């Protein structure tokens, strides 16, 4: 991979041999780093040239290891984005990813050169300017040798890039919230732009590995790729113990899933463009559905898992065996040609039959259609008028990006109660500094409270601030049963992580808050996973125990899974519509002695658990009027949200009204008999890992 500056990234082998003293010299920690300069407007100065906007509006986003804020060049006034790593000590992996990011950003701005593989080249790329496809690097921190590294003055890793207006995720979230689906023309325009961007990356000889809506941003009407610090060269080998690799389970391909969860894959996987093509397909579908297409499947697995990590492994296990395209049912009626492109060329489970991004540009879906600028939403005109094929019919500034959620609008609380809160920065041993608050953890993972002054439900800690926090008891305090939350959230380089202190009215309440806050700190809806030794070990444990245990669910447990009530039920298939008769199928089902709902799968020729004992213990049951279903005597089994994920209800239909009443009565009795029993050891995720999908 060429480099347009003197920066040289490290290979994975070099990272493994780095001496810690080479990476984190004494004093080069966040806690001991020099305080940054302030200008007349109290904005922090980065790299001696850029003012960082420290206001609420200046906050752009935050990940597990970095924070991004708006800024501007002091000399020219140019608006920029400033990303800094918030870890208190830069380790070898972070430095490797930082240097790789600089190398890749520089390489992406070099002119296109036709690759040797003809499947990765298209005439569109001959006239494309890289600056219109990839985010521009403006500046970055350097070490004493002038290479990418910890800044000699700030003691921080920093990257300065051009400033985007919003991400694709922001755009889709706003459209979903406002119930404004995209037009066919806009979907086509964005689809072509996305294929050209990712095709350009592949032509450069790189694979992204974490392509999803939040890693695509709009810069003055142009769609560009970001978060390239995880890019790897085509043909390189990826292993599960490589901590520099991140991916999102709900956007990854079947062959990637197979590489992770199948036994005997210790040799790794070869980086290939097809890994990104699948992610592109998921993202294109989202332009129509306005939500992640794999989210319902992941959600159903999460309700049967003990954590997001286990749910991710279960999802990967399901995905690796996928035999047909997971085409959303909304696509064919929306645009038949687009549906055909997705089903036959992009979301193809067999990677050998999947087309490349640039090959898709020649699909009939794009022929004989003119791309246009919206008269009601014109884009900024540039010198690249001839490249209008990837100019987007999207707003340049009108998307509402809610970076800080101040008012809580959630409808469900995971836990709630009264807490004493210590005033920020005050001494916990001073009784006068504690105030009583009604507080709760919202189903989106945010910690909220009721403000009597403003008469509003407010968010104290957003879920992305609470995620990754350390929650523990505080021993020395004026109030007993005190808890402390140490977040990873840092407003600016040189700051310390924020700390919040609370006290519960009793030891039992403190234990409950500790339990729920710890669960919330581990929550990440539609998570991004980082590979590395701990994940590799967890995957091996999953292969040896969870999967094997799953195979033994009904082998020696016949007594507890034997029926106490058994009858035939109709069930709506996964992602089906209860108003469509073809979406219903018949199953022999029963309520087991242990309170779970079990059925016989003809496909698997075995008994499978549909709802576990713990599921039934927290479920509710609701009758559906006959006119609202293709089948009479329909009822729903509803589960409460879990870690911010809402679950689609299970929909069933009995043979008669009397039988429906009998089913609901028996399910209610099973619920009453199992409430308080949190043992979910029967691993009832089997039902949705097999024939239900």
Image (cartoon, rainbow, N blue to C red):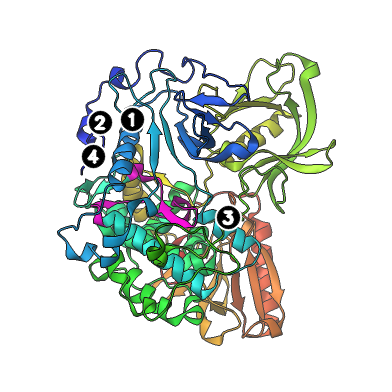
Please give the residue where the numbered disc 4 appears in the rendered image.
3
Q: Position of residue 51 (x, y in %)?
A: 53, 29
Label 4 – label 2 distance at C-alpha: 19 Å
> Which range is magenta?
203-230
> Which callout, 4 or 2, points to the residue nearer the camera?
4
The foreground one among 581 and 586 is 581
> Which callout, 1 or 2, points to the residue nearer the camera?
1
Q: For the residues labelled 4 and 2, say whether their Cβ atoms are less than 8 Å apart.
A: no
Q: Position of residue 117 (x, y in %)?
A: 17, 61
Describe the element under mark 4 as helix, strand or loop. Answer: loop
10 Å crowding of disc 2: few (<14), some (14-19), many (20+):
some
Label 3 – label 1 distance at C-alpha: 34 Å
Instruction: Indicate which disc, 3 or 1, sits on the residue closer to the N terminus.
Output: 1
Task: Determine whether 576 is above or below 40 in the image.
Answer: below
Instruction: Indicate which disc, 2 or 3, sits on the residue closer to the N terminus.
Output: 2
Q: Name the residue at 30% across, 17% down.
A: 21
Please give the residue where the numbered disc 1 appears in the rendered image.
95
- Residue 645's disc is 3
Q: For the residues labelled 1 and 2, say whether their Cβ atoms are less than 8 Å apart.
A: yes
Judge left or right: residue 234 versus residue 413.
left
The foreground one among 394 and 343 is 394
């Amino acid at each position: 991979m060429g480099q347009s500056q003197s920066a040289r990234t490290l290979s994975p082998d070099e990272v493994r041999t780095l001496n810690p003293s080479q990476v984190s010299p004494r004093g080069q920690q966040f806690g001991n780093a020099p305080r940054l300069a302030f200008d007349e407007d109290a904005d922090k100065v980065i790299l001696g040239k850029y003012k960082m906007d420290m206001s609420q509006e200046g906050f752009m986003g935050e990940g597990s290891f970095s924070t991004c804020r708006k800024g501007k060049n002091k000399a020219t006034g140019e608006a920029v984005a400033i990303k800094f790593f918030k870890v208190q000590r830069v380790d070898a992996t972070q430095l490797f990813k930082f240097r790789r990011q600089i190398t890749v950003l520089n390489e992406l701005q070099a002119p296109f050169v036709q690759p040797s593989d003809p499947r990765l080249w298209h005439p569109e790329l001959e006239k494309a300017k890289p600056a219109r496809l990839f985010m521009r690097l403006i500046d970055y921190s350097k070490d004493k040798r002038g290479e990418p590294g910890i800044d000699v003055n700030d003691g921080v890793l920093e990257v300065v890039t051009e400033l985007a207006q919003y991400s694709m995720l922001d755009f889709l979230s706003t459209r979903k919230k406002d119930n404004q689906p995209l037009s066919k023309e806009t979907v086509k325009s964005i689809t072509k732009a996305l294929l050209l961007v990712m095709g350009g990356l592949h032509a450069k000889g790189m694979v992204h590995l974490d392509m999803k809506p939040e890693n695509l941003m709009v810069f003055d009407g142009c769609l560009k790729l970001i978060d390239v610090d995880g890019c790897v060269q085509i043909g390189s080998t990826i292993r599960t113990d490589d901590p520099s690799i991140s991916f999102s389970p709900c956007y990854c391909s079947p062959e990637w899933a197979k590489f992770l969860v199948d036994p005997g894959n210790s040799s790794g996987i070869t980086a290939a463009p097809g890994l990104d093509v699948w992610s592109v397909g998921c993202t294109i579908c989202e332009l129509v559905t306005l939500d992640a297409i794999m989210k319902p499947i992941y959600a159903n697995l999460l309700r049967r898992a003990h954590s997001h990590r286990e749910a991710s492994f279960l999802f990967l296990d399901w995905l690796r065996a996928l035999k047909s395209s997971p085409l959303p049912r909304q696509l064919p009626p929306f645009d038949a040609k687009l549906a055909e492109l997705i089903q036959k060329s992009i979301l193809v489970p067999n990677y050998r039959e999947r087309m490349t991004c640039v090959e898709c540009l020649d699909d009939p879906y794009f022929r004989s259609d003119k791309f246009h600028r919206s008269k009601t939403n014109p884009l900024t005109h540039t010198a690249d008028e001839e490249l209008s094929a990837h100019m987007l019919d999207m707003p340049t500034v009108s998307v509402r990006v809610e970076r800080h959620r101040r008012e809580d609008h959630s409808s469900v609380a995971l836990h709630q109660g009264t807490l004493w809160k210590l005033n920020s920065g005050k001494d916990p041993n001073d009784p006068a500094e504690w105030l009583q608050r009604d507080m709760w953890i919202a189903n989106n993972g945010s910690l909220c409270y009721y403000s009597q002054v403003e008469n509003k439900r407010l968010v104290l800690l957003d879920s992305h601030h609470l995620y990754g926090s350390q929650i523990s008891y505080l021993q020395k305090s004026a109030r007993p049963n005190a808890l402390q939350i140490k977040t990873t959230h840092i407003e600016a380089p040189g700051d310390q992580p924020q700390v919040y202190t609370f006290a519960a009215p009793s030891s039992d309440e403190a234990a409950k808050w500790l339990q729920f806050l710890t669960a919330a700190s581990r929550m990440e809806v539609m998570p991004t996973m980082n590979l590395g030794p701990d994940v590799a070990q967890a995957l091996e444990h999953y292969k040896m125990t969870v999967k094997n245990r799953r195979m033994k669910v009904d082998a020696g447990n016949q007594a507890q899974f034997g029926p106490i009530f058994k009858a035939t039920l109709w069930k709506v298939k996964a992602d089906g519509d209860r108003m469509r008769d073809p979406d219903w199928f018949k199953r022999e089902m029963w309520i087991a002695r242990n309170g779970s709902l079990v059925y016989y799968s003809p496909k698997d020729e075995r008994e499978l658990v549909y709802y576990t004992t713990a599921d039934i213990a927290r479920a509710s049951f609701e009758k559906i009027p006959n006119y609202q279903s293709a089948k009479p005597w329909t009822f729903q089994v509803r589960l409460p949200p879990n870690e911010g994920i809402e679950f689609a209800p299970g929909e069933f239909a009995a043979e008669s009204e009397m039988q429906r009443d009998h089913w609901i009565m028996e399910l209610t009795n099973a619920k009453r008999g199992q409430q308080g029993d949190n043992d979910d050891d029967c691993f009832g995720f089997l039902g949705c890992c097999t024939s239900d999908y």
